Amino acid sequence: MEFRHLGRSGLMVSEISYGNWITHGSQVEEDAAFACVRAALDSGITTFDTADGYAGGRAEDVLGRALQNERRESLEIFTKVYWPTGPSRNNRGLSRKHIIESINGSLRRLRTDYVDLYQAHRYDYSTPLEETMEAFADVVHSGKAHYIGVSEWSADQLRAAHPLARELHIPLVSNQPQYSMLWRVIEAEVVPASEELGIGQIVWSPIAQGVLSGKYLPGQPPPAGSRATDEKSGAGFISRFMNDDVLTRVQQLKPLAEQAGLAVAWVLQNPNVSSAIIGASRPDQVHDNVKAAGVKLDADLLTAIDDAIAPIVERNPAKTESPAKRP
């Protein structure tokens, strides 16, 4: 495993991190979830990402129990706040009330006294940014989180939050966007702003929800049990890639390299990417994806990739904020 700084902070993270968005607490049985975490640890992964909104908090609970016998100081545990955690109108968003209550719930489920990174899961248009950042500052200053990050924020939102974070003496060090060969919407605006501000990307879906593995074939139904067939497994996200034009061009990548590892290695070529999040329902998927650690892709291969898929790549920066738009 290779390690990188998270943005311009001193925090080192494994360049491949393990996330449990659609697996722990919902898609896979607990024993399988524990086996995947064990495979991640055995592969050298030290960085684990979750959120209070995943599987109604069960994802945090499963991850906390899977990691409870590990040396806490040897891990980087990340979680998030924003999506609903209960029926009340105050059980969502980035108000002070929800942030303070949510960090306490997350720490309880994760069985830890602190998280290394606490992230705003989306931008909250209904709460003043100053209120959100002041609440995050109290979380950091109370020792419940070391660093602050965001997820799917636009360049303008990052620029608005950064000076507030500096005034409040809290380290805003990361953004967590979707990023893959097929989904490059952060490249035009978010990445330049992040480089300017010292913010690193922790990217999710580097394999485009499994599409870049090559297992989905044009003109054929998705394999039984695959993510594209299971609404609980993020089928709504994968649907944008499930058309014959995309799937045909993805098949053209097969002669170039082993596809899952290639896709993860590709996002890691971007110097603003601090870590790529992988998920798994089986330990062998973890082992396959960690092969991308430390891999350097030469210019000819990068050009061949672009030649194969250029017409189907999404680059529109306006799609950065999806799906949490202004009410």
Image: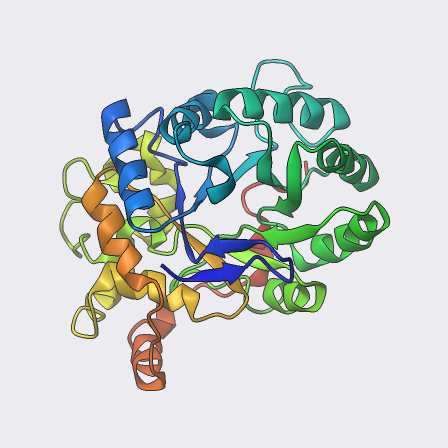
x and y, in percent, of residue 239 in the image: 34, 46
What residue is shown at x 37% (from left), y 49% (from top)?
Answer: 45
Q: Nearer the viewer, residue 216 or 76?
A: 76
Q: Is residue 53 left or right of residue 305?
A: right
**Where 137 falls versus 11 (above or below)?**
above
x and y, in percent, of residue 75 in the image: 47, 42
The extreme right residue here reads: 167
Q: Is residue 152 visible?
A: yes
x and y, in percent, of residue 258 in the image: 20, 65
x and y, in percent, of residue 278 in the image: 36, 48
Q: Nearer the viewer, residue 293 or 93?
A: 293
Q: Based on the displayed image, in which of its 4 quarters is residue 194 positioned?
A: bottom right
**Where 321 falls versus 251 (above or below)?**
above
What residue is shown at x 81% (from left), y 36% (from top)?
Answer: 134
Q: Is residue 244 visible?
A: no
Q: Is residue 149 left or right of residue 276?
A: right
Total tally of numbered discs in the picture: 0
* The N terminus, quarter of image: bottom left
